[in-house]
């Protein structure tokens, strides 16, 4: 049985104001997250370009969905927001509904 978040397109962004620079996200999904020179995590687009503008969302590659979801759930700064691609519904992160 698959859950909806395993089949839906997801988008992710990082709130740098809350980022602690812990690096779990970079360890879990280095193709999606990367540190910038300020020591904070940012998202990368499909071409691997770092997106440093506040609130920029990128698509989550299908094979990395679970890693990105785990990153959001385990982030000590609670700064990773994973949204459904077709809406602004947060499925993981600080504003996601409690399971």
Image: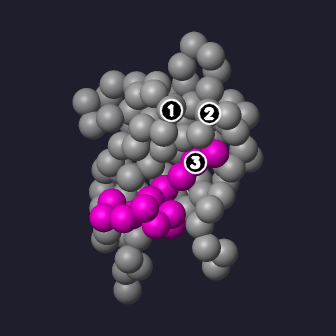
Most foreground residue, 4 or 14: 14
Q: Is residue 75 left or right of residue 51?
A: right
Q: Which disc is residue 80 wearing?
A: 3
Image location (x, y in percent) of residue 21: 68, 30
Q: Earlier in the sequence, mark 2 or mark 1?
A: 2
Above-or-below relation of 16 to 83: above
Q: Position of residue 13 (x, y in %)?
A: 48, 44
Q: Is residue 51 something one can see in this rendering?
A: yes
Q: Is residue 69 left or right of residue 65?
A: right
Q: Earlier in the sequence, mark 1 or mark 3?
A: 1
Residue located farthest toward the top when viewing the structure as drawn = 37
Mark 3 vs mark 2, CA separation in Å: 9 Å
Dot 3 alpha-carbon crowd within 10 angstroms: few under 14, some 14 to 19, many 20 or more: many
At a point 48% along the width and 39% down the height, the residue shown is: 55
Is residue 27 shown to the viewer in this render? no
Q: Are dots 1 and 3 in contact, CB under 8 Å? A: no
Give the residue displayed 64% in from the left and 20% down from the top.
39
List x then y, in percent, for residue 25.
57, 42
Q: CA distance from mark 1 to mark 3?
A: 12 Å
Residue plotted at (30% across, 64% down): 86
Reply above or below: 68 against 23.
below
Q: What is the x, y in percent for residue 2?
A: 37, 80
| Quadrant including the N terminus | bottom left
Q: Which mark is residue 16?
A: 2
Per the image, the residue denoted by label 1 is: 54
Q: Which class describes the residues within 10 Å of circle 2: few (<14), some (14-19), or many (20+)?
A: many
Work out whether 96 lies above or below 30: below
What residue range appears in magenta?
Answer: 79-91
SS class of the residue under badge 1? loop
Q: Earlier in the sequence, mark 3 or mark 2?
A: 2
Q: Residues within 10 Å of mark 1 (few under 14, many from 20)?
A: few
């Amino acid at each position: 049985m698959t859950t909806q978040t395993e089949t839906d397109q997801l988008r992710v962004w990082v709130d740098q104001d809350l980022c602690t620079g812990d690096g779990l996200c970079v360890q879990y999904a280095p193709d999606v997250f990367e540190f910038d020179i300020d020591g904070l995590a940012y998202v990368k687009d499909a071409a691997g370009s770092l997106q440093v503008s506040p609130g920029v969302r990128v698509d989550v590659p299908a094979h990395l969905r679970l890693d990105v979801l785990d990153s959001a759930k385990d982030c000590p700064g609670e700064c990773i927001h994973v949204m459904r691609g077709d809406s602004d519904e947060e499925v993981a992160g600080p504003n996601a509904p409690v399971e």
